[in-house]
Image: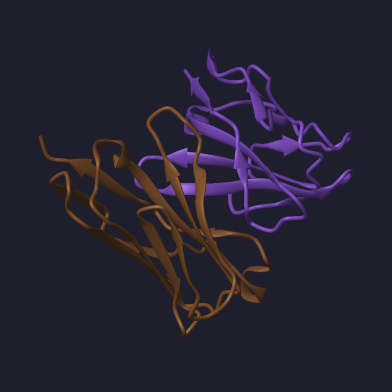
Amino acid sequence: GQQLNQSPQSMFIQEGEDVSMNCTSSSIFNTWLWYKQDPGEGPVLLIALYKAGELTSNGRLTAQFGITRKDSFLNISASIPSDVGIYFCAGSGMESNYQLIWGAGTKLIIKP
Amino acid sequence: EAQVTQNPRYLITVTGKKLTVTCSQNMNHEYMSWYRQDPGLGLRQIYYSMNVEVTDKGDVPEGYKVSRKEKRNFPLILESPSPNQTSLYFCASSFRGTGELFFGEGSRLTVL
């Protein structure tokens, strides 16, 4: 099945650093979503985006719906230890029959 | 508390022994879905249901069955499990398939 191109695959960061990750698609989407998965748990929705160009924040997290409707970005400012986990992007649109297409995830690791 | 409940959380079984993973949600969601998560492959959709008695195949339906007789329940059935179905399984639900999914805590299945 189709999968989004999510990068980077993993990131080693120092506490306090800003983090950026992105997702690209070959299809146009109407919806972009960002989820976080903590170890041993199911993914939890962080941010939902429904309009091209939309920029939405949730605390230290900010996500953008790309104006081409084929990409999205997630930024985390001033990372803290509890930011560790796997971040997934997901998108949907007419070309996916409105089913979610998922990225493979970005694993965030805090350097000791 | 709004939640998606899966059982069992952990299961070790043998090839060919039928098993069912139950999923129940208490949010009156119309849409429910099953995913499997494997290292490096992210989340792959197995089956989904838009409403009671309406189910459809996702990206990896082979070897699985589902049913949706009631709105709250969406069991995943493995009629004859095989080792390649060893995986972490997630049930998820949302209001009318908006993509804002609520995930269960996962069921880790090992088929020997």
| On screen, residue B71 above or below B77 | below
Whole-percent x, y for residue B51 in the image: 85, 48
Whole-percent x, y for residue A64 in the image: 43, 71
Which residue is at the front of the view, A4 or A19?
A19
Tell whether B66 sits left or right of A61. Answer: right
Per the rendering, the colour in which chain B appears is: purple
| On screen, residue B46 above or below A9 | above
Q: How many marks?
A: 0
Tell whether A18 sits left or right of A60. Answer: left
| On screen, residue A77 above or below B77 | below
Please name the residue shown 35% across and 54% down the image. A60
Please name the residue shown 48% across and 33% down the image. B84
Residue located farthest toward the left when viewing the structure as drawn: A112
Per the rendering, the colour in which chain A appears is: brown
For the C terminus of chain A, the image quarter is top left
Q: How is the image coloured?
A: by chain
Residue located farthest toward the front when viewing the structure as drawn: A59
Residue located farthest toward the bottom when viewing the structure as drawn: A68
Whole-percent x, y for residue A65 in the image: 47, 73
Please name the residue shown 48% across and 80% down the image. A53
Please name the residue shown 62% across and 20% down the image. B16
Whole-percent x, y for residue A54 in the image: 50, 75
| On screen, residue A56 above or below A9 | below
